[in-house]
Amino acid sequence: MTERPTKEEYGGHFGTYIDIVPEGNIVDILADDLKSTSEFLSDLPLEKAEHRYAPGKWSIKEVIGHIADTERIMSYRLLRIARGDSTPLPGFDQDEYMKYVDFDAYTLSDLIENYISVRKATLSLVRGLTDEAWARTGTASNTVMSAKALAYVVAGHGLHHIRIVKDKYLA
């Protein structure tokens, strides 16, 4: 799947994530990102894992947990839409999710393993999609979305947060 989603395939703030995904086959991009992100995270100094670059900001551990949680949600949406389920899917509030989990209590290696497991599940899903499945649309967060656009959101969301970690947490 090398064609980027068109603006008609997504709405809202999702373009922010889609726009930062590099050109190429989205399945390959997700696979390459699995390797580069897991290597980057594995090289993080343990003393930085609970670092917050400003008061009220998430720690690096929380960012990693958030990336995995969001990918699970977006991949579930992708599955439902790719399989032709037209039930509108609700949005979610990332801050509410964070209230009910203590990612800082996890080890860094457990969070990395969680991220790897989630990405591998996403890859297993998208590798089997037909052209018709990629093109199917549904409603998520009150926005029309294609399965293809959701795969790009998964990739772009992770890239967005890893850039923040590099720019603000490790600078």
Image: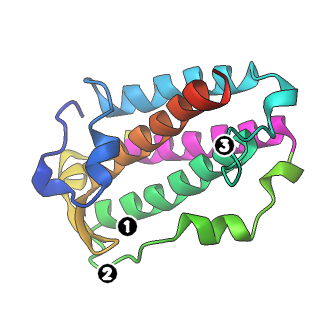
Q: Amino acid at mark 2?
A: Thr
Going from N to C along the chain, the mark reached first, 2 or 1, is: 1
Which region shows up in magenta? 107-126
Residue found at x 74% / y 43%: 61
Q: Which residue is mark 3?
A: 64
Q: How is the image coloured?
A: rainbow
Q: Is residue 163 magenta?
A: no
Can you identify the residue that label 2 sits on? 87
Point 74% across, 23% down: residue: 42
Whole-percent x and y of residue 31? 48, 28
149 versus 101 height, above or below: above
Residue underneath mark 1 = 80
The disc labelled 3 sits on which kind of residue? Ile
User: Residue 8: in sight, yes or no?
Assistant: yes
Are dots 2 and 1 in contact, CB under 8 Å? Answer: yes
Query: Which comes before the other along the chain, label 1 or label 3?
Result: 3
The numbered mark, 2 or 3, whose residue comes first in the sequence reads: 3
Which of discs 2 and 3 lies nearer the camera? The answer is 3
- 124, 138: nearer the viewer: 138
